[in-house]
Image: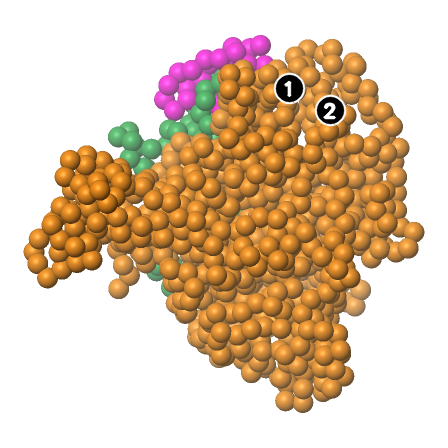
Chain colours: A green, B orange
């Protein structure tokens, strides 16, 4: 067992992990941050995306020990300080960008990472970026609209082009 | 103007907040104190005789609580099939045993052989590797036609062969043959409806718990219908009476049909929790899901369409092989029969329609309902053969469909159902308008300039939803009623909990159902909450599938709310010293008609629970009502879809450039949610048409058991928003349920696959590849390229 210490959603946390404990297991089972989901076992679905040191990472593909000392952010840390939904979260609700909610945490975390690097993505760029996130419910249409809206773009105007 | 509250308002979903903040409560988020974990050792061969299973070494490994094999389940019931199909000779279908853990033989890759319960999942997995299983591999039957050949290896040794049933339905043979004999033209098409895997993003999970104190079992499970699981598992598998068995399906991450069924893992965890006196948890991996979730579709069909000299449809005849897989899953037998044959008339007034289906056992994962369930298979073959007929006859495919539309309602089809209402011309016209059909020629010319072939595909469909009248489905072999139930519990201060039998796993019931109740009562929607997914909290329920939530359970909720209103008016009449027949309810106020005397909703609800001034001689205190609703008929949503594709003739790659759906769902309670349902269905249909394929090799090895191999649609496979419209403005309300709703969940998945394939064939013909009359789904680049090049 190895002791790991990291900052998760602004709080310093520690735990004893085995060498093969995945970051997603540490978050879900040790920290009980169950918003991060596991939808596959081949790093395809993206339901487990979190931010590690500001970068989007599939937490099923990283050992907890590798995150020792890192800044980790999960879906539980995405709301505004007053508890209200962040711009991206609010856009997902406004544009009905989720149905069953299972892929949603990963979608929101990926969307946040995209908009950090590319604040005004084109529709094609959004769709391309979501290559690593699978949603089975929404058909992506409303997820794409939500992300475009969260970037401050006029979604009806884009649709009318 | 769009409404801003009640029925017809595009309310944002209240459930979103918890899903967007990581506060959802899915089954895998549930851990019960002291729980152990189970790992299933599954067969890696498609067919084999189990000679021995040696668990002795594994049992001594660290953390192992107990190891179970099929022997532990002797005397325990097998997994039941919920629908008895009678074949054309009047004999019942063959119904082989489906043990919880394999007994004697393994019959598909993924068949569970043993189950290791251990303190940790890792320990369970490690110990499973130490189990020594001696299996004598047997030849596997995979191809359905070969499975039916004389002398073929039998999946089930106690059956005569691999035929589950041979079913015939619709117009009699003599009449059908006469229609074809007298026809001016007959178009024939052979096609495959490809095997799919539903793939809800949340894999299945089961947690069994047992309380010795009161001999009560609890199962937390990823189910679309917890009461159905309680009934099937309690009564048929484990012999646990309902009052000792609670089934909880909390937040469920998508279902699409595959979470309807009662699975071995649910029964195992419930059984093992008592046997081990510890809670037992199982969480499926995705790879495990591919080999243990029931698959969908997998039909091989020959369809013939007969037309007279004026191009009127005079006959349809189909011959289908339907794959059951190795065992009969819960509703597997009903899918190729009553959910498929009854839709073979489509939107058309064809006088003779005969459906023939042979259901076949193979050494593959069981096949059952997947989004649309039988109706996509019916639509695909009918709409493909119509398109081929139009091409052969040199007529416009839209005109040919239009000419043959049913226009008078109600309409009794030759395949036993009666469409109550519809307007197929309206949805066709709406589709043409939104698609800009006149502009297609210019768009095609533009594509051709870029070296691409552009095709236009159209499709009409009808589905039967809101399943269904219990007495009818009982006659057809269903072993369950298909009503639903709701309890409306009004609290003293006027807030309301509605316990519904429908289950929301993405459909937004928590938002939509309160819209209905609040509108009926004239109160704020925030005063109404929905409770679902727990057999200990809701009266009963058949769950959510087949686009039935609002049409069936919503109707029960309306009926219960009507009872509430009737009783509340009696209380209000008493408080206002008026006859309850003179009381009107509007905007949450009870008023004596024609006067200004009124009491508020809260005054009446308080009086019901503090009955100091109350008509106790006439009515009981309290304000809670339950209704069970059994529908009088199916509902019949219908629509017209169109899409344009571009085909790269050099690579065979197909891209969808434009997509329009024009649906008739009857009345719509929340347009935003309805559109979301259609988007999702269309994406799954596009997935089936272009990408998805559950593939087995000839030995029964599953080749597509992960997202590395099974192509799920991604965001860039779906048309851009500027070329994508889903419309539901054509509305012919259902005539027999109180809300006039028809259901919208499956439409997209039914309507889109033939639309896409029709467009691809149109594109290829425009490029002179007129020898290509059909390409089986998924219409992948390799298949298109091979078709173009005559390979």
Quick check: B464 above or below A98? below
Residue B165 x %, y %: 76, 56
Q: Are marks 2 and 1 on the same chain?
A: yes
Q: What element carries label 1?
A: helix
Looking at this view, is B771 or B226 the one in front?
B226
What numbered label is drawn on residue B275? 1
The residue identified by callout 2 is B72
Q: What element carries label 2?
A: helix
What residue is at 53 percent from the left and 24 percent from the top? B216
Give the mark count: 2
Question: Where on the picture, by quarter, is residue B520?
Answer: bottom left
Q: Quadrant of the C terminus of chain B?
A: bottom right
Q: Give the range drawn in magenta.
A: A1-28
Residue B58 painted magenta: no
Quick check: B403 above or below B755? below
Quick check: B150 above or below B510? below
């Amino acid at each position: 067992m190895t002791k790991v210490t990291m900052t998760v959603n602004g709080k310093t946390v520690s735990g004893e992990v085995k060498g093969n404990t995945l970051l997603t297991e540490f978050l879900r089972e040790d920290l009980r941050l169950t918003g991060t989901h596991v939808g596959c076992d081949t790093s395809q679905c993206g339901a487990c995306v979190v931010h590690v040191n500001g970068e989007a990472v599939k937490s099923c593909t990283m050992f907890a020990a590798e995150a020792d000392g890192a800044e980790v952010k999960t879906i539980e840390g995405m709301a505004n300080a007053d508890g209200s939904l962040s711009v991206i979260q609010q856009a997902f609700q406004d544009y009905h960008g989720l149905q069953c909610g299972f892929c949603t945490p990963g979608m929101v975390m990926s969307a946040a990472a995209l908009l950090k690097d590319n604040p005004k993505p084109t529709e094609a760029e959004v769709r391309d970026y979501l290559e690593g996130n699978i949603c089975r419910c929404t058909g992506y249409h409303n997820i794409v609209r939500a992300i475009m809206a969260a970037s401050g773009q006029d979604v009806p105007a884009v649709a009318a082009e | 103007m769009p409404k801003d509250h009640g029925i017809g308002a595009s309310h944002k979903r209240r459930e979103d907040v918890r899903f967007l903040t990581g506060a959802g409560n899915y089954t895998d988020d549930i851990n019960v104190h002291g729980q152990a974990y189970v790992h299933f050792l599954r067969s890696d061969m498609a067919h084999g005789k189990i000679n021995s299973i040696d668990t002795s070494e594994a049992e001594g490994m660290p953390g192992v609580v107990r190891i179970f094999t099929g022997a532990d389940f002797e005397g325990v019931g097998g997994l039941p099939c919920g629908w008895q199909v009678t074949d054309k000779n009047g004999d019942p279908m063959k119904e082989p045993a489906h043990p919880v853990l394999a007994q004697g033989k393994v019959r598909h890759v993924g068949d569970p052989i043993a189950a290791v319960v251990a303190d940790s999942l890792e320990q369970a997995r490690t110990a499973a590797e130490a189990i020594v299983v001696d299996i004598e591999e047997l030849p596997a039957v995979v191809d359905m036609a070969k499975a039916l050949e004389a002398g073929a290896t039998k999946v089930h040794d106690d059956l005569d062969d691999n035929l589950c049933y041979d079913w015939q339905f619709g117009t009699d043979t003599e009449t059908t043959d006469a229609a074809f004999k007298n026809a001016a033209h007959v178009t024939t098409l052979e096609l495959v409806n490809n095997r799919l895997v539903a793939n809800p993003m949340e894999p299945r999970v089961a947690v069994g718990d047992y309380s010795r104190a009161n001999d009560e079992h609890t199962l937390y499970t990823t189910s679309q219908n917890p009461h159905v699981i309680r009934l099937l598992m309690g009564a048929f598998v484990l012999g646990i009476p309902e009052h000792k068995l609670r089934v909880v399906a909390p937040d469920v991450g998508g279902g699409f049909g595959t979470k309807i069924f009662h699975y071995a893992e649910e029964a195992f965890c419930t059984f093992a929790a008592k046997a081990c006196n510890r809670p037992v948890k199982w969480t499926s991996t995705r790879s495990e899901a591919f080999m243990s979730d029931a698959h969908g579709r997998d039909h091989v069909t020959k369809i013939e369409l007969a037309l007279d000299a004026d191009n009127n449809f005079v006959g349809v005849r189909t011959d289908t092989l339907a794959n059951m897989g190795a065992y009969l899953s819960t509703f597997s037998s009903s899918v190729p029969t009553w959910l498929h044959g009854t839709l073979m008339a489509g939107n058309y007034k064809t006088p003779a329609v005969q459906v023939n289906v042979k259901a076949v056992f193979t050494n593959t994962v069981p096949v059952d309902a997947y989004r649309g369930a039988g109706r996509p298979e019916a639509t695909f073959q009918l709409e493909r053969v119509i398109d081929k007929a139009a091409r052969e006859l040199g007529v416009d495919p839209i005109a040919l469909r239009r000419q043959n539309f049913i226009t008078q309602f109600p309409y009794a089809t030759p395949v036993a159902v009666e469409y109550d209402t519809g307007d197929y011309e309206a949805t066709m016209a709406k589709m043409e308008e939104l698609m800009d059909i006149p502009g297609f020629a210019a768009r095609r010319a533009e594509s051709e300039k870029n070296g691409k072939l552009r095709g236009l595909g159209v499709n009409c469909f009808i589905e039967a939803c809101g399943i269904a009248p219990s007495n009818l489905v009982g006659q057809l072999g269903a072993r369950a009623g298909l009503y639903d139930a709701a309890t409306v519990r009004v609290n003293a201060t006027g807030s309301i909990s509605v316990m519904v039998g429908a289950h929301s796993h993405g459909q937004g019931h928590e938002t939509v159902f309160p819209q209905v109740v609040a509108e009926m009562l004239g109160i704020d929607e925030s005063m109404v909450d929905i409770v679902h997914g727990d057999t200990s909290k809701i009266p009963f329920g058949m769950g959510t599938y087949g686009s039935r939530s609002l049409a069936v359970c919503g109707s029960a909720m309306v009926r219960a709310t009507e009872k509430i209103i009737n009783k509340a008016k009696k209380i209000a009449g008493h408080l206002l010293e008026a006859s309850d027949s003179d009381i009107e309810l509007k905007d949450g106020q009870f008023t004596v008609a024609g006067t200004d005397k009124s009491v508020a909703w809260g005054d009446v609800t308080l009086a019901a629970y503090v009955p100091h001034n109350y008509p106790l001689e006439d009515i009981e205190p309290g304000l809670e009502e339950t209704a069970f609703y059994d529908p009088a008929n199916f509902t019949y949503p219908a629509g017209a879809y169109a899409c344009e594709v571009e085909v790269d003739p050099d690579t065979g790659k197909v891209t969808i450039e434009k997509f329009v759906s024009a649906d008739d769902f009857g009345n719509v309670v929340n347009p935003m949610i309805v559109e979301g349902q259609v988007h999702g269905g269309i994406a799954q249909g596009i997935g089936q048409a272009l990408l998805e394929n559950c593939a087995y090799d000839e030995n029964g090895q599953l080749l597509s058991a992960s997202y590395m191999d099974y192509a799920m649609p991604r965001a860039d496979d779906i048309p851009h928003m500027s070329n994508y419209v889903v419309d539901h403005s054509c509305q012919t309300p259902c005539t027999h349920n109180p809300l006039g709703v028809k259901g919208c969940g499956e439409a997209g998945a039914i309507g889109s696959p033939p639309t896409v394939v029709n467009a691809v064939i149109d594109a290829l013909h425009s490029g002179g590849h007129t020898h290509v009359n059909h390409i089986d789904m998924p219409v992948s680049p390799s298949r298109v390229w091979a078709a173009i090049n005559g390979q």
